[in-house]
Image: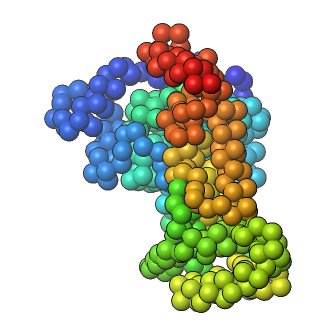
Amino acid sequence: MTGPWSSQRDVSAQTSRLLIERAHGELVAGNVADPRLADIRPLVRDSWRRSLTSLAGPDGSPPVELTADELDRYRRRHPLAEVMDMVRSLLLPEPDAGVVVAVGDAAGRLLWVEGDRRVRVLTGEMGFVAGANWSESAVGTSAPGTALALDRSVQIHGAEHFNRLVQPWSCTAAPVHDPETRRVLGVIDVTGGADAATPQAQMLVDATARAVEGELLVSRLRARGAARPARRRAPRADTTTLRVLGRDRALLEVAGEGRQTVTELSARHAEILLMLAVHRQGVSADALGDMIYGASGVDSIRPEMVRLRRVLERSAPHLTPQSRPYRLPLPLETDAHHVISLLDRGAHRVALSAYAGPVLPDSVSPGVEEFRETVRATLREALVAEASVEVLLAYAETDDGAADEEALRLALEMLSVRSPRRAGLIARLERLEGDG
């Protein structure tokens, strides 16, 4: 590999990976007085302890807190949006540089994750994707989260990560401050192999953060010189999600300023609202009737829409459907769309965890059946095409994956010839062949 991430020095050789792993295991097990902890870098040791206090799990995936629509809106108004071209030019001069560069907000939520496609696919498996929370309280010790916790640049090497899923990677991160108030605006992180956590990498990431702060200041001074009136910030809108995976009576969740309401919908209302969420451009009464009832369902759909409006006027008035055509006044996010969005971002492991089951599994409405199959097929095809063997094995434990012969054979091919898990896969494939 060539470019700014090349180095003759193997930083990971400075410490014993075995020692770190054993010390980590003792800490997670509650043996906080184990003498091996004294040999771990104080920065890492202190971060591990904060991670334990915050109840961050050593094996879990980070929470993805921003849906695709929320992420797009938030990125557009975030102050670091205007300097992203500078970040790319300084840290990603080549598309195949062997690293990914992430820019997050002050809370540790990643807003941009760009760089080498192969590395993005691999790191996406552990949930290193836009919209995910990588603060210390969410995933434990990592460069972006620990840099924000300490308000200074940080490097984390391999096994020093608190979360075991992240330990194959190394990373360097530095916070970015408001050039006038010094308030933390966000964080810049570089993740990759050992070369992503060298002294040269730290100098480059630090320099990029300072250059970004300087550019922000210059931009503000120019704006003031032009005497442009400040734009008033729009009030925060409610966030509404329809949960339809693995349940027949969908939940409509509305979260606003300091409040949250959850409404359980009838099976029919869940079907109608889902179809309106899928067809955001709107549908005619005839088309919606066909989706819900099959042919000639228009006479039944109109009175049901009246009843649905009454329910939404009480629980989510901002979502009350409009007519001619039937449509929602605002886009409605569903947990099924969230799974598809995660797959698009390469977060296969997180997407599989978020897939709670088929869409409205007992529904026989034609439109719902079609969407259910679309979501199921999209998930399967993404996993078979790009997922790691660990994710494929997790998929094999689901109802869909247990009978998926192609996925099982692919997992078998990807496993090491000495893996103890091969015997179980071979037995399952033999049973499927026998049943066939």
Q: What residue appears at the point 39 percent right and 45 percent down from the top-left corner? A: 140
Q: Is residue 371 left or right of residue 397?
A: right
Q: Position of residue 289 (x, y in %)?
A: 77, 74
Residue extending farthest left? 33
Q: Quadrant of the C terminus?
A: top right
Up-down relation of residue 144 to residue 241 (above or below): above
Q: What residue appears at the point 35 percent right and 20 percent down from the top-left corner? A: 18
- Number of numbered tags placed on the structure image: 0
Q: Position of residue 296 (x, y in %)?
A: 81, 74
Q: Nearer the viewer, residue 300 or 310?
A: 300
Q: Position of residue 354 (x, y in %)?
A: 53, 51
Q: What residue appears at the point 68 percent right and 84 percent down from the top-left corner? A: 305
The image quarter containing residue 25 is top left
| Colouring of the image | rainbow
Q: Nearer the viewer, residue 302 or 395?
A: 302
Q: Is residue 209 visible?
A: no
Up-down relation of residue 306 to residue 16 (above or below): below
Residue extending farthest top? 418
Q: Quadrant of the N terminus?
A: top right
Q: Nearer the viewer, residue 48 or 382?
A: 382
Q: Nearer the viewer, residue 109 or 225?
A: 109
Up-down relation of residue 213 to residue 282 (above or below): above
Q: What residue appears at the point 49 percent right and 77 percent down from the top-left corner? A: 263
Q: Is residue 54 visible?
A: yes
Q: Position of residue 141 (x, y in %)?
A: 40, 43
